[in-house]
Image (cartoon, rainbow, N blue to C red):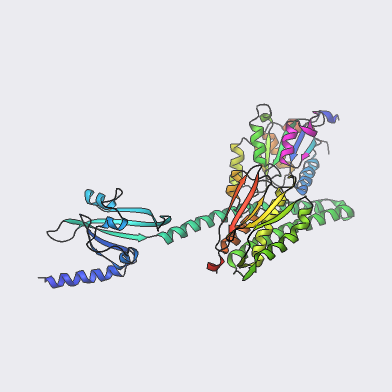
Amino acid sequence: MLSEDFFTQQTSTLKNCMDILPQEVVFVDNDFTILWMNKSKKKQHSKLRVGMKCFEAFNFTAQCDFCLASQTLKIGSCIKNPVCLMTGRKKNKPRHMNIMITPVNLAKGQADGYIEVVDNVEALYQSYNQLEYLNREYESVIYALSHDLRSPLISIEGFLRKLQKNDQAAKDHALFEHCVSRIHANVEIMNNLVNVLLDTSRIITGKLDLQEVDMEEFIKHIVGDLHMRAGENNTQITMKGSFGVEKCDKIRVQQVFSNLIGNALKHSKNTNELKIEIGCDGTVYWVKDNGPGMSPEIQEKLFEPFTQTTKIDPNSYGMGMNIVYKIIQKHKGDIWLESQEGKGTTVFFTLRVDSAD
Amino acid sequence: MDYRQLETILLVEDNEDHIEHTVDALYEGGLVNKIIVIKDGKSALEYMYRQGEYSDPKKSPRPCIILLDVKLPKMTGFEILKTLKNDPELKVIPIILLTTTCNKEDIERGARLGVNDYIVKPVEFDSFMHKVKGLGKYWALISNLTNN
């Protein structure tokens, strides 16, 4: 016959096993008193103690309305549920988890209770979201590539056929020249597109060349470069606010400003007295214009690759804002915009390079 | 042959090379119809509604068929398609969408908006005539074929 020591020993072994699990495990009485919890649970909820009521951990005075445990006790069978709780001081940090609650008889003669096992799947959830985003991006790149790379191919094929078919082509120098020069032009289009894609890929996979940059001097230099282009359009480019020293990849951030200012210039060709303001309040940078603005549909897709809804510039592939987004993302910053049709657009962004790689 | 009687084909395409190849293909196949080329979406609608520089019906006749590129400056092919197919008078004019790939989404989107058919570029005479035949416009164009 098994002795009581045997059961004590088995219980101890079981508790040790549960202590090394990454999942949070807690044994609770049916009046919601915590009887035991493993190390993962203690680590996650430092205020939780054996003997206290489980709902006290969430600053409730009675059992929660959404309590899965009371449902388990009521129906007498196991409940498995994916749950998302907002955590943190401001309740703005989502925590995705899978919760499993099993009703048990804790010991002979005692009231029924339950075991709760919480599997934190936040990292998995984030990875899934990231993967979904990358999948969508991959699909749109493939879609755009199939269009934008095929277009010059169709042209090249057409000119080659023309050369092949036309007996006069060998004799007709002008026709020959025309076909060859168009083939060259289309090869260049394809080459440029491939370069844009390679550049995007380098931003994603490459490392940032970080350095301390005096942003005021730096932006003055960029504005100077763009001044010639802006001058054609009676455009004013001004700087506003306080620009400090920022740790960033100078070449990449120059690309951000050039793309944003370049976009404002490109889309505002019909705007009289175009005004572009480059600003910073010490944390947030912005590029503001009084151009035509964007419809909500365009705003929604603006940062996705190949998002030209209509072609304004035949040499553009709609990758500029996607590249900007990726550079900001690489600097651990955020980017967002405010735009109203007929009133202009302001693109805001931050650079949180201290936490970047 | 009296060219004034010929039916007009409207080609809405911005890529100069594709215009050249399409026009070449149709003329080399023997069509003698007038092909009017419009290079952006906004102008295509102005043409169809006879606005601005297209207000004279003699200079801007209604086309018997429209070849419409998907990606266009100022307004996409889908936007033009939607506008024309929602117009009680103009919706009868067959529209063939020109795409660079046989992308399912583009084809389905075109179908939802009422497109009559589509051609994957490059436009070739045989495939064009095959589509035209399906649209019942074959004889309107074939009667204008040259003998060569």
Marker count (numbered): 0
Q: Is residue B42 magenta?
A: yes
Instruction: Specify the quadrant of the image occupied by residue B108.
Output: top right
Q: In the rendered view of the protein, which quadrant contains the C terminus of chain B?
A: top right
**Residues drawn in magenta:** B37-57
| Residue A326 visible in the shown view | yes
Instruction: Give the farthest residue toward the left.
Output: A1
Q: Nearer the viewer, residue A341 or A172?
A: A341
- Seen in the picture, residue A259 relative to B82 is either above or below; the reply is below
Task: Please give left or right for residue B62 compared with residue A340 in the image.
Answer: right
Q: Nearer the viewer, residue A148 or A87?
A: A87
Task: Please give left or right for residue A47 compared with residue A146 in the image.
Answer: left
- Seen in the picture, residue A226 relative to B3 is either above or below; the reply is below
Q: In the rendered view of the protein, which quadrant contains the N terminus of chain B?
A: top right
Q: Nearer the viewer, residue B8 or A215?
A: A215
Q: Is residue A345 magenta?
A: no
Q: Which residue shows up at 66% across the image and 37% down it?
A: B81
| Residue A187 visible in the shown view | no
Residue B33 x, y percent position in the rendering: 80, 35
Residue A138 x, y percent position in the rendering: 57, 56
Residue A319 x, y percent position in the rendering: 65, 55
Residue B23 x, y percent position in the rendering: 78, 42
Instruction: Specify the quadrant of the image occupied by residue B114.
Output: top right
